[in-house]
Image (cartoon, rainbow, N blue to C red):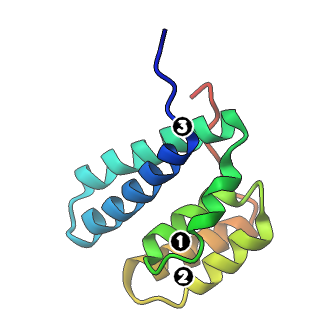
Amino acid sequence: MPRVIPSVKLIRDYARAARDRGHALEAGDSDRANVHFDALTSIYKELKRRGGLEGLAELAGDSDPNLRAAVAWALIEQDPQLARRLLEQVATSPGLPGFSAQMTLREWDKDRLRFPTEAE
């Protein structure tokens, strides 16, 4: 029987992957950043399948803009008000997190965001 990972652990893993992806991007290591993005996507799909994305909202107050942006992205469909508020906050941050949040808001406003499905 496969081991079931508790949602609380998935949320912790999501936070770690978001932070690690941010550090990799800041270091210019796109290969490592992609590995962490794949982890984020996988965890997102599993939480969505379980109906547990709302658990990510507890990370919304974290000081790391990379984590807040990743939480916002994951919650756009479920809690668009919180997601927009987080992205607008992060958009004022310097560097890549701020730029990424600005671009996410722009694409969202143009209805061009796409989210991974369980089948992908």
Asked if the residues shown at circle 1 and circle 3 are in contact, with their CB atoms under 8 angstroms apart, the answer is no
Which residue is pictured at 31% across the width and 60% down the height? 20
In primary-sequence order, the first of circles 2 and 3 is 3
Q: Give the amino acid type for the residue marked by disc 2 in the picture.
A: Val
Which residue is pictured at 67% across the width and 40% down the height? 48
Q: Give the amino acid type for the residue marked by disc 3 in the picture.
A: Pro
Residue 8 higher or lower than 27, as above or below: above
**Disc assigned to residue 6:** 3
Q: Where residue 57 sits: x, y (%)?
A: 65, 63
In primary-sequence order, the first of circles 1 and 3 is 3
Q: Give the amino acid type for the residue marked by disc 1 in the picture.
A: Arg
Which residue is pictured at 76% across the width and 54% down the height? 77
In primary-sequence order, the first of circles 1 and 2 is 1
Cα–Cα span, label 1 and label 3: 22 Å
Local packing at callout 2 (Cα closer than 10 Å; few below 14, some 14-19, many 20+) is many
Cα–Cα span, label 2 and label 3: 29 Å
Q: Where residue 94 sits: x, y (%)?
A: 41, 89
Q: Secondary structure at mark 1?
A: helix
Q: Which residue is mark 2?
A: 90
Cα–Cα span, label 1 and label 2: 7 Å
Q: Which residue is mark 1?
A: 68
Q: Secondary structure at mark 2?
A: helix
